[in-house]
Amino acid sequence: MKKVIAILVLTIGVVLNANAQDSMVDKSMKTIELEQTPGEFTKKSLTVNEGTYVFEIKNNGIDHNVGFVLVKKGKDISKPENHIQTAYVTAPVKTGDTQKSKPTKLEKGEYIYFCPLNPTATDNLLIVE
């Protein structure tokens, strides 16, 4: 009987902990979904409001891993120190998979996004108003 009660208490604790974590998720955070096909992003430009975003990158039909790089427009995209590193996907995106970035705060301005692994054009534009 003691084992049953211990298991019940443990189960309730796990459920309550999971619910508490769900309620702590920042509801103001939004997701920007971008899809890569061989040699390009399907969205060449988009406009969003200032705020915190997670980038969700999908690899659609590319036979190798892809990634994601975001740079403030006007900065040298070839220099990693200019990359907004929180926007990198947390793992390479395999064919048919999707990966997310860490939350990234976007301020008003223009940004360039690209994938050096695909490789895609470096003129994809993200405008933050």
Image (cartoon, helix red, strand yellow):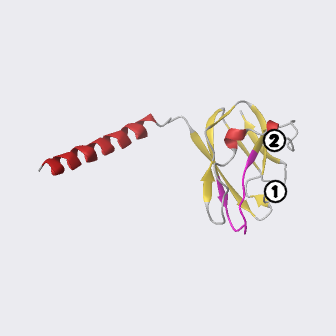
Q: Residue at x 81, y 37 (%)?
A: 81
Q: Mark 1 falls on what kind of element?
A: loop
Q: Is residue 11 visible?
A: yes
Quickly name the residue at label 2: 80
Q: Residue at x 86, y 36 (%)?
A: 75
Q: Residue at x 71, y 61 (%)?
A: 65
60 is within the stretch colored magenta: yes
Image height of 4 relative to 81, above or below? below
Q: Mark 2 falls on what kind of element?
A: helix
Residue range (magenta): 57-69
88 is within the stretch colored magenta: no
Q: Residue at x 44, y 34 (%)?
A: 24
Find residue 102 and report its image quarter: top right
Callout 2 crowding tier (Cα within 10 Å): few <14, some 14–19, many ≥20: few
Relative to 103, 5 lies left or right: left
Quickly name the residue at label 1: 120
Quarter holding the C terminus is: top right
Q: Position of residue 123 (x, y in %)?
A: 84, 48
Q: Nearer the viewer, mark 2 or mark 1?
A: 2
Q: Position of residue 77 (x, y in %)?
A: 85, 43
Report the amino acid beneath label 2: Pro
Hey, which residue is sitting farthest top in the picture?
108
Relative to 4, 67 lies left or right: right
The one nearer the camera, 9 or 52, is 9
Residue 13's tag is none
